[in-house]
Image (tube, coloured by chain):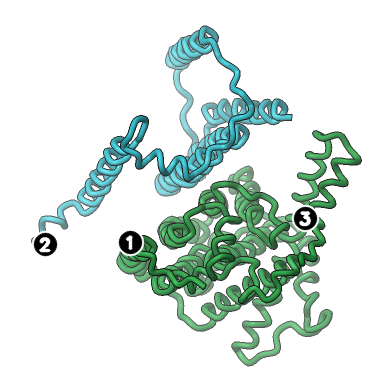
Amino acid sequence: MNISLSITKNIHDWLFEVMSAPFATVVENVLIAVAFLAFFALAGLLLVWMERRIAAFFQLRLGPNRVGPMGLFQTIADALKLVSKELTGPDKADKFLYNLAPYFVIVASLMALSVLPFSQEFHAFDINIGVFFLIAVSSIGVIGILLGGWSSNNKYSLIGAMRSGLQTISYELSVGLSILTIVVLAGSLQISEIIAAQQAGGWFIIQGHIPAMIAFMIFMIAGTAETNRAPFDLIEAESELGAGFHTEYSGMKFAYFFLAEFINMFIIAAIGVILFFGGWLSPFGITESIPLLGIFWFMLKVLGLIFLMMWFRWTFPRLRVDQLLTLEWKYLLPINLFNIVLMAVIVWLGLTINF
Amino acid sequence: MEQIIFYILAFIMVFFAIASVSSRKILRAVVYLLFVLIGIAGFYFLIDYNYLAAIQLTVYAGGIIVLFIFSVLLIHHIDAEIEVATLARRILVGLASLIGAGLTLSVIWAHPFVVAENSTKPTEVREIGLGMLSYGEGGYILPFEVISILLLAAMIGAIIVAKGTRLTLKD
């Protein structure tokens, strides 16, 4: 018995009934884009609120608790304040690149958002190369950071941008290879097929046992580094660089960088959930008859992983640059390469745990 | 619909290609070049060749352009502008580019293009992977392995160049 409400399918059919086909396609695409932009803004603000509450929890403070229930509207008030601020910039900056840089960061994270499956039917772009597309677009975001840092004409910004480029390029390797480990197990790059494989044989973190767990640990470490969050936040290390690459940005342009950082965290957590924890699947298939609940399970798992990343932030001290590079090139990369071979052997010999 | 998108992409690419070679600020030129490369990726998406599009984004946008930006960041000051070449040199380069463009256009116009059937399904990654590793007819195992050896050699070479004298001093 499948109680399927199929909201997206109804809207799709209705649109094509009312309008001619090419016009309906355009309207549909615009609707999807607006939905994702709204999600981008709302999820970003919610995550900022969550970060502040969790930081307060770890430091035995209260955190924002005045505006709205439990301070929920605090970040919205902050965003309104940022919108009303004047946009200032350094006199001798390269104005064109300076204004362009935030959009690179935002477009890259929006493109990555578009392939995430929120539920079986809330899946905007189920592309055949799925996970590979995610890796491809995530490599564009760093261009925005580099441009922003350079065009600000400020040495702290430049140092922050250089550190960021170095860090993102190094850790992209580890993210890519740990994703590949799971692709070996799934036998497909398409996200819907990866989840279908987990529906058939259990979540990959259990199905792939030891190598999957190693891959998950590497993925979380490298993912935290790729989003430039503590303990890998030496690109905006407050005590050394002011605010790093976005020192010279004010008002909404600063907010773009800030929101994009939180959305990137959401994307990394979502990729982790898709690859290791079954995406929108419910544990043991308890709510398989209600497909709409997939969105609840997906968000619950993603928020769980985001909590883990926020936990990292208040647990570990910041790394030095040389420690950062040693960790990636001397530990994570060799372990990762060995791990892929181990996973291949396990899949080859059929040693996976299947339910 | 597809035609409209094609013309939009083509216009963006031509515009930014010209902007890229005529800009006097080097980092702006690199960014314009990035737009051209992303436009090419857009073409690949348009003809449903998603794999090549993603490769284009990873290798060119994510790899080569980032490398360009890095080197510009390291060697160029923000106020630096490229010198304008002398008139004789500009005329020479203009003639050379006209000849190149003429050659390319004449080849394109002389070639009898066959309109592809629209029923071809999008290429799947599985087929590409199997093609890369097949040693039968039309398989790509030999070029694949040769390229992997080439890349290994390049990597070892880079390490040796970067280490310089330190490599021999320690032993």
Residue lying farthest front? Answer: A1
- Position of A192 with respect to A218 (left or right) is right
Query: Disc 1 versus disc 2: distance between alpha carbons?
Result: 33 Å
Report the chain shown in green.
A
> Quick one: label 1, few (<14), some, or many (20+) residues within 10 Å?
some
> Contact (CB < 8 A) between labels 3 and 1?
no
* Residue type for callout 2: Lys
First along the sequence among labels 3 and 1: 3
Residue B20 is left or right of residue A32, and the answer is: left
**Quarter holding residue A40:** bottom right
In this rendering, the label closer to the viewer, 1 or 2: 1
User: How many numbered circles does the render carry?
Assistant: 3
Q: Name the residue under label 3.
A: A35
Label of residue B170 in the image: 2
Residue at 47% of width from left, 67% of height from top?
Answer: A219
Label 1: which residue?
A341
Tag 2–tag 3 contact (CB < 8 Å): no
Q: Where is residue A60 in the image (x, y as percent from the top left)?
A: 63, 92
